[in-house]
Image (tube, helix red, strand yellow):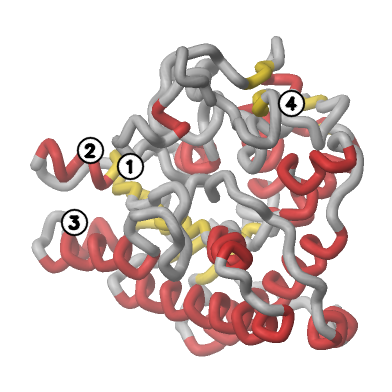
């Protein structure tokens, strides 16, 4: 996800009929590995990008991004570590090398996998000139075909897939209609399903996909309420996306041996943190959870903005660790730690 408006059109009755029609039945599926994964492959956007965008025009390459870790801007869209870093640590791996970094160096297959994610991208093209998820998977397929990653290594790997909302932001930028929202949500989820199936067909044994977060609670849409109230309409859209994703993943698991597809319920993880002003398991406390640590002095500016004279045009909190969100759409390192701490409990029976 990159910074852009996240206020969605009013939803049609289709949305609410889907939500009302949810079933409550659950079944246990054993997703566990026979042995510890040896590689992590990452696809998606800025929630998982650890430095694929090299351009200094990207906010992730400018101060104050990276002030917590590694101390300088690293290409991560946060003050420090992002979801990829915590997921890799959970797998007892180092964060995988970025595709951009590897391609520039021309080395053999990286030991811990590879990160193909680019901030601002979606499953379809967005306004950002970076590879969408289909192209990211093309990159991966090429490396597998050229034996940069041997089949035995791919077979002991996990994929992390993050489609966190840029498609919907771009839909609004293009003045997408209320009537067109329903089929667009369906097309996004259908494409996610195609992507997941394709990654699995290339030999990846287990694939974790992010559900859409509580986008109505991001600082960008809550700024109008002085960061006090979530946008219910945006959250309703996210619920529909997540319901359709759940149905799609259940279908894929029924069709595929070993039930390899797993959903990270980011929506409820984030919402729980906001409601409880933290996560006791992670010893994380956020007194004003909707307020970002770093934000522009006006709507014309954002975190890291400077004017033509180089004067900073943003406000930065004293302790990023005390904030759930770093900027208008991205969590802080502590925010990601708190979120992953909630998500990790669902993985102990899966990986």
Picture quadrant of residue 349 = bottom right
Q: CA distance from mark 1 to mark 2?
A: 7 Å
Q: Is residue 171 left or right of residue 106?
A: right
Residue picked out by circle 2: 101
Residue picked out by circle 4: 323
**Residue 265's x, y, as percent?**
69, 58
Q: Earlier in the sequence, mark 2 or mark 3?
A: 2
Asked if residue 94 can be seen in this view, the reply is no
Residue picked out by circle 1: 52
Q: Residues within 10 Å of mark 3 (few under 14, many from 20)?
A: many
Q: Helix, strand or loop at disc 3?
A: loop
| Residue beneath the point at 81% across and 72% down | 10
**Residue 196's x, y, as percent?**
44, 73
Q: Earlier in the sequence, mark 4 or mark 3?
A: 3
Q: Helix, strand or loop at disc 1?
A: loop
**Image vertical order of residue 184 relative to residue 275, above or below:** below
Residue picked out by circle 3: 149
Q: Helix, strand or loop at disc 2?
A: helix
Q: Nearer the viewer, residue 311 or 141?
A: 311
Q: Nearer the viewer, residue 168 or 197?
A: 168
Q: Is residue 5 left or right of residue 154?
A: right
Disc 1 versus disc 3: nearer the observer: 1
**Residue 309's x, y, as percent?**
46, 13
Q: CA distance from mark 2 to mark 4?
A: 30 Å
Q: CA distance from mark 1 to mark 3?
A: 19 Å
Q: Earlier in the sequence, mark 1 or mark 3?
A: 1
Q: Earlier in the sequence, mark 1 or mark 2?
A: 1
Q: CA distance from mark 2 to mark 3?
A: 16 Å
Disc 4 versus disc 3: nearer the observer: 4
């Amino acid at each position: 996800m990159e910074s852009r408006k996240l206020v969605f059109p009013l939803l049609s009755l289709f949305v609410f009929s889907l939500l009302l029609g949810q079933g409550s039945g659950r079944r246990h599926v054993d997703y566990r590995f026979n042995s510890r994964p040896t590689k992590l492959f990452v696809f998606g956007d800025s929630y998982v990008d650890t430095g694929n965008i090299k351009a200094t025009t990207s906010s992730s390459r400018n101060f104050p991004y990276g002030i917590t870790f590694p101390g300088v801007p690293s290409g991560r869209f946060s003050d420090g570590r992002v979801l990829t870093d915590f997921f890799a640590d959970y797998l007892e791996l180092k964060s995988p090398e970025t595709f951009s970094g590897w391609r520039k160096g021309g080395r053999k297959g990286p030991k811990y996998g590879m990160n193909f994610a680019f901030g601002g991208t979606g499953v379809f093209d967005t306004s950002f000139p970076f590879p969408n998820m289909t192209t990211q998977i093309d990159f991966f397929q090429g490396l597998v075909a050229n034996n940069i990653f041997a089949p035995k290594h791919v077979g002991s790997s996990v994929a992390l897939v993050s489609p966190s909302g840029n498609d919907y932001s771009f839909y609004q930028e293009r003045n997408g209609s209320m009537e067109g929202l329903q089929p667009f949500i369906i097309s996004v989820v259908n494409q996610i399903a195609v992507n997941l199936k394709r990654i699995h067909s290339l030999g990846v044994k287990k694939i974790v996909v992010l559900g859409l977060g509580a986008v109505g609670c991001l600082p960008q849409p809550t700024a109008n309420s002085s960061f006090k109230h979530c946008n219910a309409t945006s959250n309703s859209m996210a619920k529909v996306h997540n319901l359709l994703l759940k149905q799609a993943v259940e279908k894929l698991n029924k069709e595929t041996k070993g039930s390899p597809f797993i959903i990270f319920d980011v929506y409820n993880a984030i919402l729980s943190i906001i409601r409880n002003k933290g996560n006791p398991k992670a010893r994380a406390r956020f007194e004003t959870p909707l307020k970002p640590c770093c934000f522009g002095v006006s709507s014309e500016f954002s975190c890291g903005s400077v004017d033509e004279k180089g004067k900073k045009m943003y406000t930065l909190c004293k302790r990023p660790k005390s904030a759930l969100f770093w900027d208008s759409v991205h969590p802080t390192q502590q925010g990601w730690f708190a979120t992953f701490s909630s998500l990790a409990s669902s993985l102990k029976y899966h990986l």
